[in-house]
Image (cartoon, rainbow, N blue to C red):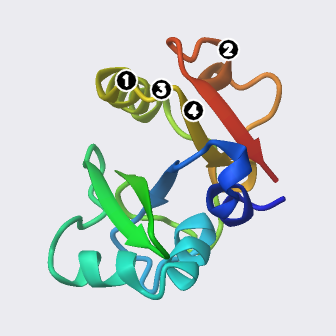
Amino acid sequence: MSLQDVLLDPKSGVTTALVRTYENERPLLGAGGELDWRFQGAITRFVKTGGIKGKKGECVLLPIRFKSRDYKILLIGCGPNPHPGKRAPIDEATGALIKKSLVALKYKSIGISKADFVIDSESEFIKDTGGFTLCITP
């Protein structure tokens, strides 16, 4: 199941997704682009109004109401992408920012795309999640 499938499936219990954004990727690519398509451009509209620029260190929570359900997209700015469309593992500072944000928001279950965050079983990011559960999709 993709991230969008998990997020939109009421049985999954996942209503929050973690998405990378870059300064130089427009339209959004990766999981952000897929979710944006599913949510009929809601993320793009937010980006176009200046809600997030994709700068490294930005972290913005975007609430979305879609088909009578509430969703939250946590957008993480990763700066410029030297290879737009390709993904590299997140750096330590970005991983720390994500963990701090998720712990502060007190979410218990978060959807994340393995391909978007380049996660494997050895990734430091998933070894200590700080009390929340990651629902990792391909």
Per the image, label 3 sits on a secondary structure element best described as: helix
The disc at residue 109 is 4
Could you say which disc has been placed on residue 14 in the image? none
Report which residue position mark 2 lands on. Answer: 127
Query: Label 3 belongs to which residue?
Result: 92
Tell me: 136 left or right of 19: right
Amino acid bearing label 3? Glu
Image coords of residue 85 (percent x, y): 61, 74
Residue bearing mark 1: 106
Q: CA distance from mark 4 to mark 2?
A: 15 Å
Of the residues tagged 4 and 2, which is closer to the observer? Answer: 4
Q: Residue lying farthest front?
A: 68
Rendered position, 135 above or below 108: below
| First-in-chain label (4 vs 2) | 4
Assess disc 2: are there few (<14), some (14-19) or many (≥20) residues with their C-alpha within 10 Å of its C-alpha. Answer: few
Q: Does the residue at mark 4 contact the one at mark 2 (Cβ under 8 Å)?
A: no
Residue 24 x %, y % = 38, 76
Which amino acid type is shown beneath numbered disc 1? Lys
